[in-house]
Amino acid sequence: MATIRSKERLGRSLGFFETFAIGTGTMIGAGIFILPAIALSEAGPACIISFLIGGLISTATAISVAELATGMPKAGGSYFFISRAMGASFGAIIGLGAWLALVFKGSFALVGLADYFFVFYPIPVLIISIVAGLILILINYRGARSSGSLQNIIVLFLLIILTIFIIQGSFMLDTAKFSPFMPFGYTSIFATTGLIFISYLGITQLAAISEEVKDPAKNLPRALIASVVTVTLIYTAVMIVISGTLTFEQSINTHTPLVDVAVMLDGTLGKIMIVLAGLFATISTANAAILSSSRFPFAMARDRLIPEWFVKIHNKHETPHRAIVVSGMIMILLLLIFNVEQLAKLGSVFNILIYVLINISVIILRKRSLKGYKPAFTDPFYPYTQIIGIVGSLALLPLMGFLPVLFTIFVVFVGATWYKYYGFEKAYPKYNIFDMLENNIYPTSVPSDSRIKILVPIANPKHEQDLLELADNLGDEIIGLNVMQIPKQTSLTAARDAFHANKNMMEYLLKEKFDEFPIIVGHEREYIIAFDHSVANSIIEQAEIENVDFIVIGWHEMNRLHFSMGNVASKVLAGAKNNIVMLNGYFPKEIEKIIVAYNGKENSKYGITLAKRLAQNTGAKIHILRVIKPNIQEEKKIKIISELEQIIKELKENTISYEVKEHYSAENGILGSIGQDDLLIIGDSSQRFRVSLLGMLPYNVAKRSQRPVLIVKKHKPLSTEGINNVIMKKIKKIVRIRNESNENR
């Protein structure tokens, strides 16, 4: 059989210098072209120290980001780091805060763009800002493709212009102009540090490409630190040049001090070059804010913290048009409410909050275990680096003024309230910071070093998302199987060759199905395309080759009398040498309770194990249900209760309960116990060598149930011992029946 496998892996093509260039490019933006005049007015020449302090705190945080990024390379971003370290409640707060930081930075950049445009054309700043904002919204709404090489050229241009500016300006420094160096006292330095912090917003973006970095344990932290240090030195040098060439009055009475210095250095040419650099920097920053506007909402929507409506993709333009419009319009609205200094402070305060929580996240993850978190790089100076990042950031908050602090409190309140009333029951991850501190995230009977591998055959478009989500909540590695069924008249080799002609389209369609998964950190995925004359045979064969723990398939109602002519599911049930989980219905978005129909046999015991894994990821409670007949002997009843109590004791879970229900019909007893928000797990009751592939009980329960049902079938290898036991049981049963018959005669 010819098989094509496609694994989702990014090539590690980025070396140190490429990674360094990307990191530098995320920070060299609007800040240094807009903030100098404001910073000088707040702290005088001492604002030079403010940029150095901002760089120190950002360097410490960059080291923390490097550790987190190499431990969570598949997602990245401040939201993801913090939500996984502290739970969904903090995810709601930081998701909102990070998004607002991005929006405020975009609005801040629009004002700067207008200021530099004003140098050539004296149009009111507000009008230019609004028009530029609307144009950028339209461009991103329609999905114009940005060129990565163009972005690199812009970054290189900015670095060259600023370097020339610094070198030329260093020969014109007048030390007398640095006096008084600290006209507004020591506190002004730290207050100004908070103001200019928006300039360092962006270092977490390198986390998104960590999987592409060669030797990430070495190159990623080096690139992060080098980029922050480089940017800090550039910022500091620019401020030294401005402070040493312009008088204090000149520097604070202009919106564009860099332009004034450039005119002194190179006349009109200098003016043109700096204005162009300012325009490029501000446009790039504002556009990046809108372009990335769906990043945090999308991550939050995937974690079920906000409705998916917000990140819906446009059918024609294939852009998150709603997130773009909402973010862009808020950016424009902020222009009407706040001035440029307020925008900078409000953007910075959220950035400071992010830095604090990122450093705390490293400490939590070092102290407590999170499944799947194994950083390739660990900070050698832990915890001192994180303490610098936390203390340094927190020290800035009270000095930034009443409005930023009030706004921070407001965002925390809104985020926490939203989580409580919207995301509490359904958001990922299901644990909270107290679970992390108690190291109680993944209590499980499965050994910590074991990984559950699941095969998911994709055949029914209506069912595939439910199956994938179920698999993501049950296992650690998802293998999606797409079987190309080939007519017997066609050779498999010819079919494979024909596939290659349309490979790009086929892989796109497959990738589209799997892009949402896995959601849970640490989980892996693999796509397999197989060619076979029989779909069932391919599923069985691939499950054996991959050595999966179990197969997740969708319910297909079978004709019990004509099982030999049954469908794919029937053949897989009959022939697979793997455990099987069959889903009838949909996988619920919210599960309040998982009911396990228990009969004391191996399949139902396995059902309890799977229920526990589901409960860990969904937050559901587990309820073990044992239906007995009302006329059962008392000693048997006591034995059953004792068995259930022992199971509860062994599981050591407070969220697990049991019930012994008396009913003459096990089927009706089970169905009568299923609530509106429940999921039923029932073990297969079929016996070996029986004609039916499913026992009557699970078959009828699944057929009649109005709620989703999981049928669990644990594989039993046919050993000589096993066959002998079955034969001996049959012989004993025949003998017993014959003896009873003789006694009755």
Image (cartoon, rainbow, N blue to C red):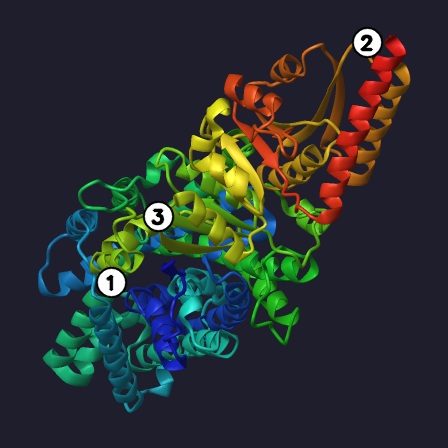
Q: Which mark is residue 284?
A: 1
Disc 3 residue crowd, few under 14, some 14–19, many 20+, Cα 10 Å: some
Q: Quadrant of the N terminus?
A: bottom left
Query: Do we see residue 408 in this rendering?
Result: yes
- The residue that disc 3 covers is 533
Judge by depth and name the residue closer to the eye, 124 or 669: 669
Q: Quadrant of the C terminus?
A: top right
- Residue 386 figure quarter: bottom right
Query: Label 2, label 3: how many angstroms apart (C-alpha)?
Result: 53 Å
Q: Which mark is residue 631?
A: 2
Which amino acid is tagged 3? His
| Residue 458 to residue 109: above or below | above
CB under 8 Å between callouts 2 and 3? no
| Residue 669 to residue 209: above or below | above
**Farthest residue, direction bottom:** 171
Which amino acid is tagged 1? Ser
Kindly state the secondary structure of the residue where label 2 is placed.
loop
Kindly state the secondary structure of the residue where label 3 is placed.
loop
Residue 737 screen position, x and y as percent: 81, 19
Residue 369 screen position, x and y as percent: 67, 57
Query: Label 1, label 3: how many angstroms apart (C-alpha)?
Result: 54 Å
Residue that appears at 60% across and 62% down: 362
